[in-house]
Image (cartoon, rainbow, N blue to C red):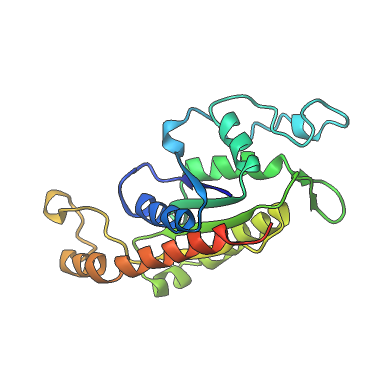
Amino acid sequence: MKVIAINGSPRKKWNTAALLGKALEGAAAQGAETELVHLYDLDYKGCVSCFACKVREGKSYGTCGFIDGLTPVLKRIIEADALIIGSPIYFGSVTGETRSFLERLLFQYLTYTVPYASIAPKKLATGFIYTMNVTEEQSKAYGYGPLFDSHARYLQLIFGHQPESLCSFDTCQVDDYSKVVIESFDPAHKAQRRAEAFPLDCQRAYDLGARLAGKEP
């Protein structure tokens, strides 16, 4: 069993990365081999619309034909058994790097048939971890739900399993709020959330990783 986690945050030691790390700990506790990939370390683009993955009888049919820093990661993902993607929410969506990654990961396996289908060579258990500074109530008011539903729908279509999902709300942005100009958040409240709520999210992430590692193919 191999579980790969994709960190779509530019930060390697903060909320998203911490939750992904806990998810991998949970997977490892089930005996899985684990790997954490930081997207911001890679030199890559989103889908370039070359359609090499769609050319009938083409050498790259069903595989992304654009070669760059993401290519070996895409190969390792489809050789794995489970995939966990993590991203903070920036301006109501995942990071640009996460979006570019999803384009490359998903489009290569999507068929333009009626109805749409997948030619992924195997099923993968998948999960998505989102971190955000807003509260759960604000996320609903701002309309984040359809974004999460869209990701879940495409992951299930391509990889054959209903994905797991975890949202970490009202996260703490920085260690020391006195050093930055952020007047729209209460530092004391954020510190309390970091101390009380975030550890619960870490446990949820651990449990998510354990479940994915134990899922039947």
Q: Is residue 210 above or below residue 34?
A: below
Residue, far bottom: 137
Instruction: Looking at the picture, tell me which residue is in the foreground, 134 or 217.
Output: 217
Q: Residue at x 59, y 56 (%)?
A: 126
Q: Position of residue 46 (x, y in %)?
A: 58, 35
Can residue 89 be seen in this snapshot?
no
Q: Residue at x 18, y 52 (%)?
A: 181
Q: Residue at x 74, y 45 (%)?
A: 120
Q: Is residue 53 left or right of residue 48?
A: right
Q: Position of residue 96 (x, y in %)?
A: 48, 42
Q: Is residue 133 above or below residue 64?
A: below
Residue, far front: 31
- Quarter holding the C terminus is bottom right
Number of callouts in the render?
0
Q: Is residue 150 left or right of residue 43?
A: right
Q: Position of residue 23 (x, y in %)?
A: 44, 57
Instruction: Looking at the picture, tell me which residue is in the foreground, 123 or 103.
Output: 123
Q: Is residue 19 left or right of residue 152?
A: left
Toward which corner of the image does residue 51 lie, by quadrant? top right
Q: Position of residue 63 (x, y in %)?
A: 72, 34
Q: Is residue 186 above or below residue 108?
A: below
Can residue 176 be seen in this snapshot?
yes
Q: Residue at x 31, y 65 (%)?
A: 198
